[in-house]
Amino acid sequence: MSLQTSFGVRVPNSGPLASPSSMVDAAKAAQSFGYDSIWVHDHLTWTFEIHRTHISSGSEEALRAKEEPDFYEALTSLSYLAGQVNRVRIGIACLVVPCRNPLYAAKQIATLDVLCGGRLDLGVGIGSPATIESREYEVLGVNRRVRGRLCDEYIEAMKSIWTTPSSSYQGKFIAFHDAQLFPKPVQKPHPPLWVGGWTEAAMKRTARLGDGWLPAWLTPEDIAPRYRKVKEMASAFGRAPDGIQLGLEVYVSIDSDPAKAKQNAVGTFRASRGTYERLMTLDELASVSLIGCPEEIRERIQAYRESGVSHFELKFIYPTIERLLEMMQFFSAEVLQKF
C-alpha cells in the first residue's frame, strides 16, 4: 500500500511579517491551493535578539522592514484562523508543554477542537534553544532542569482530562482529583499528539505518549533508523508501533532556478543556524531542507517518503507575504499535486 502524504504550511504568527492579516492570507491561500493543514508555533516569551536569530516565519531579508519581535500566541491564533478556513486542519508545532498549566491547557485545547470541528493537530514538546535565549522557563518560574519530566506528566494529565468525565491524576509535579472539565475534544480519544524534537528523549516520549513524531534537521538517511527505533520502543511500551506516524518540520525555498532558490535561503540559514537544536553548517542546513527547483524538491520528498515520512510541515523562506503566496502556489502546482 502506498504511503499517504500530507503537506501543511507554517503561517506567520511570529517573525518580521507576522500580523493577523498575514496569517489569514497564508491560511486562506493554503486552503485554496490544496494543502492539507496550516500550522503555527509556540513560545510565550520572546526578545529583540532572538527575533533576529530564530527565523521560523519569513526570512532574514524581511527583518529590515520591521524590528518589533511580534509573536502571536499559538492557541489564540489558531482559534482565530479556525473561523477563517473550514477545510484544512490546524496545528501547533509545538506547544511548549512545561510552560503551560496542564488543566488550563487541556480545556483550551478541547475547546479549540470543538470550535474547529475536530480539525486540530497538537504538537507537544519542551521548546527549542530559543527558550534559553528568551529565558522562557525563568520568566515563567518553571524549573528548566526537569522540563522533560514536566512535559511527560503534563501530557499524561491532559490525556486524563480529555478521556474521562471526572479526571484524576497523581504525579510528582501535578496532582488533581475528580476534576470535571468540559467540553471534551471532538476527536477521540483526543487530538493527535505530534511529539517535537529529534533527540533520544523526544523519540522515547513519542513511543510512550505520542501519535506521531515531528522532528526537524534530519536527512532521509538519518530519520529512517531513528523512526525504526521509535517503533521498537513503542512495542516495548506495549503500544502498536504502526499507529505512530512520522512527520517532518522543514524549511522550503523553491524556484524554477535552483541556484536562486539556494541563494534565497542563505541569509536565513546564516542568521538562524546558532538557534537550532544543534549547531549546523550552511551545507548541513541545506541537506535537511527542501531547497531547489521542483524536480530537486520532488526527489528529496520521495527520499523522505521512502524513509517513512507521511507529513511535511513546510516553513517557506520568504521576504514578503506576496512572495510566500507565489511560492505556495508554485509548490502546489509543481510538487504537492505530484504526491
Image (tube, rainbow, N blue to C red):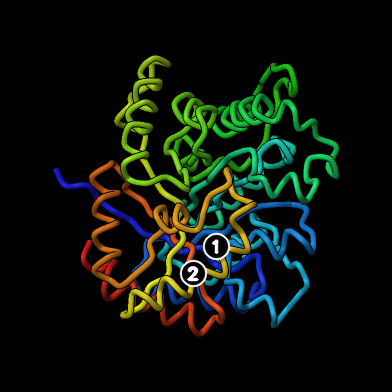
- Residue at 46% across, 43% down: 214
**Do the residues under discs 2 and 1 have CB atoms within 8 angstroms?**
yes
Is 163 on the left or on the right of 30, as rendered?
right
Q: Nearer the viewer, residue 286 or 320?
A: 286
Image quadrant where one finds the N terminus: top left
Amino acid found under the numbered disc labelled 1? Phe
Residue 148 horizontal/vertical position (percent): 65, 28
Which residue position holds label 1? 269
Nearest to the observer: residue 161 or residue 255: 255
Residue at image point 64% right, 75% down: 17
**Residue 80 seen in render:** yes
Tell me the amino acid under the disc marked 2: Ala
Which residue is denoted by mark 2 in the rendering?
Answer: 265
Q: Residues within 10 Å of mark 2 (few under 14, many from 20)?
A: many
Which residue is found at the position 24% from the left and 59% from the top? 299
User: Tag count in the figure?
Assistant: 2
Q: Quadrant of residue 302?
A: bottom left
Q: Position of residue 143 (x, y in %)?
A: 79, 30
Percent x, y of residue 116: 52, 58
Q: Quadrant of the C terminus?
A: bottom left
The crowd level at tag 1 (other Cα within 10 Å; few <14, some 14-19, many 20+) is many
Left or right: 231 as drawn, with respect to 41: left
Q: Examine the rendered structure and indicate whether residue 93 appears above or below residue 15.
A: above
